[in-house]
Image (cartoon, coloured by chain):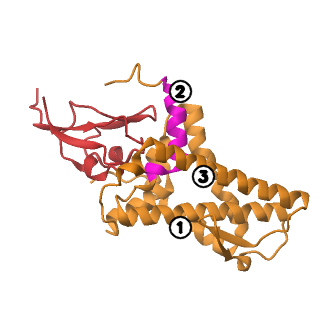
Chain colours: A orange, B red
Amino acid sequence: MKKSHWYNYLWIWSVVYFTMGFFHILFAWLGLISFFLPLVFAVGFGNKGFCNRYCDRGQLLRALGNQKGFSRRKDVPDWMRSKAFRYGFLAFFMAMFMNMLYMTYRVYVGTEEIQETVTLFWSIPVPWGFAYAGGAEPWVAQFAFGFYSMMLTSAILGILTMLLYKPRSWCVYCPMGTMTQLICKMKAGEKEDAPL
Amino acid sequence: MATQSKRHAVVNTALCVACGACMEVCPRGAIVVWKGTYSVVDDALCIGCGLCAKECPASVIRIEARP
């Protein structure tokens, strides 16, 4: 049995995050932590310390898939681990992120009304007004709805592939994981001095 | 010198996603993610138990007989 550390409990953050967004959408902004920390590790230190040790989602999927036994533990299909799919999904995810930022901008300048919905899989609007009673700048709330949509959609995708394949199969195509690995590869100067 | 196990873990580095799931489960601390790029096995420490191969989400680790 391996020694337990404080960071082994970060999966709790995933549960807390989605729960808080259910009660007040502005908490969705806290999800930016999961966006910036991996980049700090990759750009600042040239490693994937976030994925390797601190990722709350990876831990949650492992806990549900392994400890709780919800995963079929099958191999992911070859296409899912291919570079084409991983980079393609990263590009798609980034495009959707930009789209969300553009929507936030349109609300900011007043050309668009705030939409109090959480959009699942970039297409299915779910009414989420119950988690927002107003009070904030409209663009601040719009970003929160958009960001929460992205976080919830990716969490559902992660849970689906956890059930179907290996517990952490989300890590195979996680856009942040793919992006930080690319950054690390660039920083490490590819394979020339690799210890193989 | 201790005798080495007959089998050891081999990583397909081209497909490794560097998530570190293998590192997390290795009972010997024999596997690390090298500079965030892919996993590297310390052959001297690896006992070929296969926990990393079982855990790897991309299924890029194989347990093979040592050469």
Farthest-out residue, bottom: A130
Farthest-out residue, top: A192
Q: Amino acid at mark 3?
A: Phe
Q: Which residue is mark 2?
A: A187
Q: Nearer the viewer, residue B14 or B27?
A: B14
Per the model, the C-alpha gap separating discs 1 and 2 is: 33 Å
Coordinates of residue A137 in the picture (x, y in percent): 86, 63
Main SS, magenta region, reads: helix
Q: Is residue A50 visible?
A: no
In this view, the mark in front (3 or 1) = 3
| Figure quadrant of the C terminus of chain A | top left
Residue extent of the magenta highlight: A171-189
Residue in view at x 66 percent, y 50 percent: A95
Per the model, the C-alpha gap separating discs 2 and 3 is: 23 Å
Up the image or down, A85 lies above or below A165; here it is above
Chain letter for the residue marked with disc 3 in the picture: A
Q: Amino acid at mark 2?
A: Lys
Q: Which mark is residue A93?
A: 3
Q: Are marks 1 and 2 in contact (CB under 8 Å)?
A: no
Neighbour tally class for label 3: few under 14, some 14-19, many 20 plus, Cα within 10 Å: some
Question: Does label 3 lie on the same chain as label 2?
Answer: yes
Chain letter for the residue marked with disc 2 in the picture: A
Coordinates of residue A193 in the picture (x, y in percent): 40, 19
Q: Which residue is mark 1?
A: A15
